[in-house]
Amino acid sequence: MGDITFITETKKLIDELKSVCANYGLGNDGNEFKIISQTFLYKYMNDKFTYEAKLANDTLAKAKNFQEAYEKLSDDKRKFLTARIGNKAPKLQPEHLITYLFNNQSKSNFAEKFFDGTLRNINAANTDLYSIKSATGAKDKLFDDLSQFITDASQRDAFCRALVNKLVNFSFEKMFSEKYDFFATIFEYLIKDYNSDSGGKYAEYYTPHAVARIMAAILVNKKVSNAKVYDPSAGSGTLLMNIAHAIGEKNCSIYSEDISQKSSNMLRLNLILNNLSHSIPNIIKGNTIAEPSYLKEKFDYIVSNPPFKLDFSDFREGLTKDTFKERFFAGIPNVPKSKKESMAIYLLFIQHIIYSLSPKGKAAVVVPTGFITAQSGIEKNIREALIKRGWLRGVVSMPSNIFASTGTNVSVLFFDKEADNEHIVLVDASKLGETVKDGKNQRTILTKAEEQRIIDAMNKKTAQEDFSVVVSAKQIEEKNYSFSAGQYFEVKIEYVEITADEFAAKIKGFQNTLDTLFTESKTLEEQIKKNLKSLKYNK
């Protein structure tokens, strides 16, 4: 059973869950995403527990009916089993499993007592493992009462039975045992209908996998252990997942902040699907700029695709206090009069990232391409600081429309406190990629070879004609701190070897052409004069 089979079967399950929602009037409803993602997560947690329980207990591994065998275990053996599994899987009792719900689906009040009741009990048993904290320290819950989204109470039992019947015949267990990494594709598919302006409000939380892969491969090019990885505007966590995979899930701890509750919930799901559950306690729902939860922390790796357009008028004045001056060393931007006028808040995120780096820290940040050439203001102040501190490793200017949800051209800045100041790599990848239709938008797709070309240019510090340059900090200073590769490309003049006779013939041809043009010009002059003389005044 391979990756393609896993992906196909899992996509089929997601489609079937969506079909259930549609059949009960919840197609394209605002609550549909909660139902789909939480039901998907519940199934995943069931199968992860079952898989880990079989590894930890021979009796369960050999049992033909796991549900019956688990129910027969004594309380002491269940406690021992839970301790052995640890945080590899959720803590589940026999009555929490989908097979238990399936066996009891004919019972009265099934939706409230069994289905929602089970989700509530899982919430309570796994708060420490899976709950997300807000900046105030309050913890959220893992599952909602999903049946309550059906307004017709008489349909709730049938709705929950339909969900259970879709889940019971599907299993992730073989996928765990064969260790296939297909969850990036599945997660993208899971949210695709909610990742567009028409389908929902999740587009701002999604970074293309190509960009995320490039950032991770450039940042992590050697063996790493015990790394602290941070994203101050994490969204659904695509950047964090990619760098965690590059480092190794067991070799890093993930930290994140995001002001959106929806975003935090999506990130939690992504962490669980990617064997990073141990980092869920580090997810914070809060305002990174105004009330950063990790202000005293320093991080080894930071990745970010910060918001370009976000109203920060409510807390802008508070940032001008003396306590913020060290963090926002380059200045605090003014609030744009309209969102179309300027993109300002990302400048605060860049400065926050610089402030948050550990002594050997590295970072990759997506910025509007206009940032890398701005002649004055906060943009230039930040660029100048990076050069004078010796922290700029390189810049990659991406193709247009690499993000389907925005037409803004973007570049990726790479910081490294141990950067080589004499070999800074600037890459112009703007001409790469193929334009494809993505819903209502045009999107540029990079091939694997193109991704690797960008990665190699950065990591191997290679100069390629009209693609990449390797420059020193002094050269960048001489160009008014421009980070645009194009400004450093050599102007090429092609020379062709010709004989003296060929040269004379070319000059003769130029003279003949000029003589002809001059003759035509004189004729036109005479004609214009003649026409002017023929003009008469007519009252």
Image: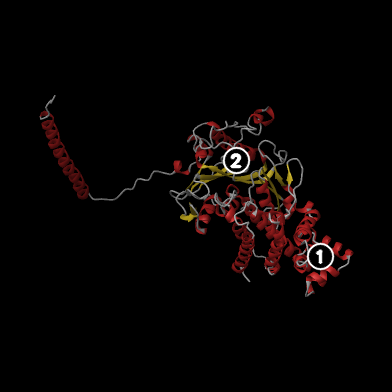
Using the image, determine if residue 143 lies above or below residue 527: below
Q: Name the image quarter holding the N terminus.
A: bottom right
Q: Which mark is residue 147?
A: none
Query: Could you tell me if residue 176 is visible in this image?
Result: no
Residue 73 in the image: state x and y as whole percent. 86, 68
- The part of the image, by quadrant, that contains residue 351 is top right
Residue 428 location in percent, x, y? 48, 47
Which amino acid type corresponds to the residue marked 1 in the rendered image? Pro
Locate the C terminus and report the quarter of the image it occupies. top left
Q: Quadrant of residue 150?
A: bottom right
Q: Nearer the viewer, residue 118 or 85?
A: 118
Picture disc at residue 94:
1
Which residue sits at x=74%, y=53%? 142
* Secondary structure found at label 2: loop
Which structural element holds mark 1? helix
Colour convention: secondary structure
Residue with the mark numbered 2: 391
Quote the CA–CA distance across marks 1 and 2.
54 Å
Image check: 474 left or right of 526? right
Rendered view: 33 above or below 332: below
Q: Residues within 10 Å of mark 1 (few under 14, many from 20)?
A: some
Eye-nearest disc, 1 or 2: 1
The correct choice, above or below, for 226 with respect to 311 in the image is below
Residue type highlighted by circle 2 = Trp
